[in-house]
Structure formats: C-alpha cells, structure tokens
Image (spheres, helix red, strand yellow):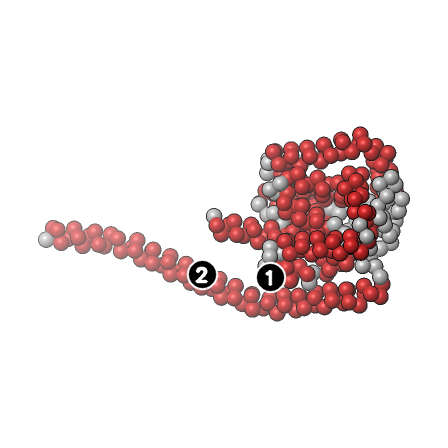
Amino acid sequence: MKLASDRSADSGGHEPDDDRRAQRFGRSRHTSYHAAVAMKTRVRLLTPLRDGGILAGGLFTLYLFVIVAPAAGTFGFDAFAYWSIDPMDPYRTGVGGLGAFNYAPPLARLFQPFGSLEWLSFLWIWSALLIGTVIWLGDLSSRVIWLLAFPPIALELYHGNVHLFLAAAIVLGFRYPWTWAFVILTKVTPGVGLVWFLVRREWRSLAIATGVTAAVVAISLVVDLPLWQQWIGLLGDTPDGGSVTQVHIPIPLVLRLPVAVALVAWGGLTDRRWTVPFAATLALPILWISGFAICAAMVRLSGRQASQQVGN
C-alpha cells in the first residue's frame, strides 16, 4: 500500500509540469503557424509589386539605351572624363561639364593610362567592368535582374560614373579595409562609412583604411602638390553643388552628413551592414540620382549577412 501511494504521489507531482509544457508547446506551434501564414500573405501581396517594379525598371533601362542613347548621344558622358583627362591640368572643366574630372590627384594618375586607348575601346571595356560589377554585387543570382532594373543603376551604366565601383569597394572594405582609400579619394565625404569601425572599436581595420589613404595622399603631395592646390580650389568653387546644372537632389550636404554619420553609428552598434552603403550615398557631395547605385552594395551585404546568420 505504501509503495502504491508513493507511486501515485510521484505521478501526481509531475502532472502539472507536464501540462504546462504541453500548453507552452501548443502555444508555440500556434504562434509559429500564424507567423507562417502572415509571411505567406505578405509574400503573396508583395510579389506582384516586386515583379511590376522590375518590369517597369526594365522598360526604363530599355528606353534609356535604345531610344535616348542614339538620340542624345550622351552615352558614356562621365566615362569620357576618365578617358580624356589631362594629367597636367585635370581640373580645367567645372563640375557637371563634359570631361569634368573632380577626384583627388592620385586618381588622376590612376586614370591617366586610359587615354592611350581609342575612345570606343575604352568605353566598351569600362561598360563591361561596370556590368561585371553589377553581376558581382547581385551575388551571381536572380538579384542581378533586380539591380539592372533599378533606375539609378541604369543611369549609372548609361553615364559611366564610378558609383558601382564605390559600392564594390564598400562591400570589400569589411574584409579589406584598404579599399576605403578609393572611396575617400574619389567622393571624399562617403568616407563617413569608417564610423562603422570606430563605434565597433575595430581599431586595426580603421588604422588600415586611414593609414593607406594617408600614405597615398602623402606620396601624391610630394609628386603633385600644384594639382592638390587646384583640386582644393575646385572644391571651394563648387559649394555643395551650387554651380551644378544637371538634375540632382538639392538637399544640402550640411543636412545630409550628420544623418549619414548617425545611420552608420547605429548600424555599427546593431550589426546592420546595409547602413554603410546607404549612409555613403546620403553623404555624397552632390546627391545625383545615379549616386543611389551605391545602394547596390546593400543587396550583396544583406545576402551574405543572412547566410552567415543561418550558418551560425
């Protein structure tokens, strides 16, 4: 009798715990089910919008290259500046003009050999490099189609600027910080992305990025001091795009820059890498529409970061 009562007491002592676990398990399954249903509903609603956006963007890209390019004759407008640069007087043309080169003297030296090519040969090579960069930023997946349908990227491919290369440099900069030298020596202010290393106390990466940039600048100052004086004068004569007549978003840099810094700082503290290219875009000296091509880096970064989280 005693043994029976003990077994009965032991059994009764566990029943409430078992019931609570069963209730929690049931609630968990119920919550997961509703979350899955909600996700499927969102996907069902957003898919037509996504597909419609891709179709509209694709039509814009087609219109730009098939209709506008032959009529306007401005395909490669920005690329022409990199091909036609005069290393002795690279800043003879003001911002926004045909052949205007606005980057620091080390970049003038970097682009100088391009002039030895025929114009059309350079244009096709340059365009192929840009398209290859889009494919890489799309992570060799269906996202490449999304990027090609993104109007700022279509404009970037049309004009042939360096925003896509900046996007690639930002992506690579998380692993190879020295690539930030290219970002800083071209557009300067998108270098706010280095705040990422600062708030995360990644001192080695910050030292590499700033050290390589400083070393390039130091060597260039010895070789091309007069060009640095000309370049600084060019920046002073163009206050935040004040003399630019081409279409751009006229929000002053003084308003955009603090927002960009705050965004990168928040992203660094919360491990959101996509904030870096978006902040770099906001921090462009002149907010060109094609400048949003830098945001293509967000696609590569978000895909890779999601894969890392799944792996962990």
Q: On the image, numbered disc 2 is attached to which residue?
A: 32
Residue 151, percent across and down? 72, 61
Residue 91, percent across and down? 86, 43
**Camera-nearest label, 1 or 2:** 1
The residue under label 1 is which amino acid type?
A: Ser
Residue farthest to the left, as pictured: 1
The tag earlier along the polypeptide, 1 or 2, is: 2
Residue nearer the viewer, 311 or 179? 179
Q: On the image, numbered disc 1 is attached to which residue?
A: 142
| Whether residue 241 is visible | no
**Which residue is pictured at 84% across the width and 55% down the height?**
246
**Which residue is pictured at 81% across the width and 52% down the height?**
118
Residue farthest to the right, as pictured: 92
Using the rendered view, name the quadrant where residue 180 is placed.
top right
**Left or right for 142, reference 17:** right
Q: Secondary structure at mark 1?
A: loop
How crowded pointer 2 is (Cα within 10 Å; few <14, some 14-19, many 20+) is rated as: few
| Whether residue 6 is visible | yes
**Left or right for 291, reference 201:** right
Using the rendered view, name the quadrant where residue 76 is placed.
bottom right
User: Disc 1 versus disc 2: distance between alpha carbons?
Assistant: 29 Å
**Which residue is pictured at 73% across the width and 50% down the height?**
163
Residue 73, percent across and down? 84, 61
- Vertically, is 26 above or below 283? below
Residue 52, percent across and down? 66, 69
The residue under label 2 is which amino acid type?
A: Ser
**Which residue is pictured at 85% across the width and 63% down the height?**
72
How crowded pointer 1 is (Cα within 10 Å; few <14, some 14-19, many 20+) is rated as: few
Q: Secondary structure at mark 2?
A: helix
Question: Which mark is drawn over residue 202?
Answer: none
